[in-house]
Amino acid sequence: MSRPKTNVFTLTASAGLMPQEEMLEVAKQSAHLNIGIPRETTLQENRVSLVPEAVARLVNNGHRVVVETEAGKGANYQDRDYSDAGAEIAYDRKKVFECDLILKVDPPTLEEIDLMEPGHTVISALQLSVQPENYLKQLIKKRITAIAFDFIQGKDGGYPFVRTMSEIAGNTVILIAAECLSNVNKGKGLMFGGVCGVAPTEVVIIGAGTVGEYATRAALGLGASVKVFDNSLKKLSRLQNWIGQRIYTSTIHPDVLANALKNADVVIGAIRSKKGRAPILVTEQMVSDMRFGSVIVDVCIDQGGCIETSEVTEHARPTFQKYGVIHYCVPNITSRVAQTASIALSNIFSPIVLSMADLGGMSNMIRQDPGIRNGVYTYNGSVTNEYLAKTFALPFKDLNLIMMANF
């Protein structure tokens, strides 16, 4: 009995040997973004979110950047610098806020939210403590996706915006303290650090985070004697290792801290709270026992301050005296060195925007980048930050579930 004939094409097809259509990877659809850079209107804010060099980079990658006139003035950038970089200069604020993506330093005001187009995105600081009660409701009403850059996480789990601004603040507070100690600013007439034959300046730093680290480095570099207090042994140990030399460190015991403050020429308050108000660690009694003419710089005044006698001041009148102690309590210290801070912000903003474009837009980036997702507090009309939802008694929606539903 003869076998049935088998078609050779049947055999090759079953073996997967027939010619197949070539499967090519589908290229990701990149987006061309319209980016708006408004002029900051908040009191004392001199920083700008993108400097001209960063604008040129974005424009060269095919994006449109609209800069409000005099947006960079506080950081000593002129409109011509931006126009030469390829930006459009807008003399009408509304034109800036019509852009798909708004990059700001301070949070948008209620008036600025009204100018935004529904469904657009804003990236700025959050600064919840200074926002009115109906702030979130306005964002929800406009279906704005709002991202707090101070909560954006890097791949290492850190917060790049916070760390960069903290580095600048840590260095700057020591320079501020040096100014406040001088006769020119009605201080006690001490040179920060000291010279041979003269006892060094005594500096107490409360907080061993990034601000504390860079304040310590700057103070030691000028020759001061430094004592650092923090309730985290891990932070204190890490500070010792990063500084590269042995310094006085201690956990925060009220009696030990009080004794250190009595001999201090400068006190830096740099301990923050993850949520809500900063803890008060220096009481009014402790301040009253300090030396006449000594200086307090409360870096965490934007969270209420960690020193009981602190009161918010401004760059025009940055100091006041209480119990003969000079207090410097300006919230946005980095705005004092606006160009440096603006360049630092640009160095983080521009790669984020370029990555956003490569991924096809903000929604895709939020879906794919957990670090960006961590900073989102409203998404297309929903409050996605549980803490904010509870604080303002608003409905909370899990952003991860929203992203899955929209996939």
Image (cartoon, helix red, strand yellow):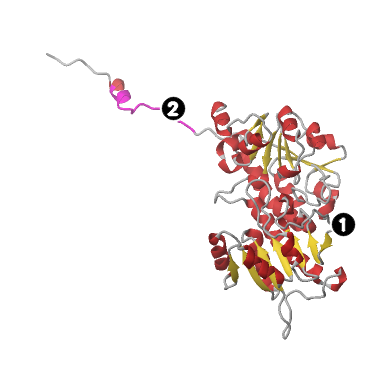
Mark seen at residue 316: 1
Count of all numbered marks drawn on residues in the image = 2
| Quarter of the picture holding the N terminus | top left
Residue 334, picture quadrant: bottom right
Image spot of residue 194 (x, y percent): 74, 79
Q: Is 232 placed above or below 66 here?
A: below
Residue 257, picture quadrant: bottom right
Magenta residue check for 23: yes
Amino acid type shown at disc 1: Ala
Q: Is 189 placed above or below 170 here?
A: below
Is residue 18 or residue 107 the one in the foreground?
107
The reply to whether callout 2 and callout 1 are in contact (CB within 8 Å) is no
Image spot of residue 339 (x, y percent): 78, 56
Image spot of residue 34 (x, y percent): 73, 37
Amino acid type shown at disc 2: Glu
Residue drawn at the location 55% of the way across and 26% of the way down: 405
Residue 181, picture quadrant: bottom right
Q: Secondary structure at mark 2?
A: loop
Q: Confirm whether residue 172 shows in the render.
A: no
Q: Secondary structure at mark 1?
A: loop
The magenta region covers: 11-24
Q: Residues within 10 Å of mark 1 (few under 14, many from 20)?
A: few
Residue drawn at the location 66% of the way across and 71% of the way down: 226
Residue at label 2? 21
Relative to 1, 122 lies left or right: right
Relative to 210, 186 lies left or right: right
Magenta residue check for 80: no
Q: Residues within 10 Å of mark 2 (few under 14, many from 20)?
A: few
Relative to 364, 146 lies left or right: right
Image spot of residue 352 (x, y percent): 64, 45
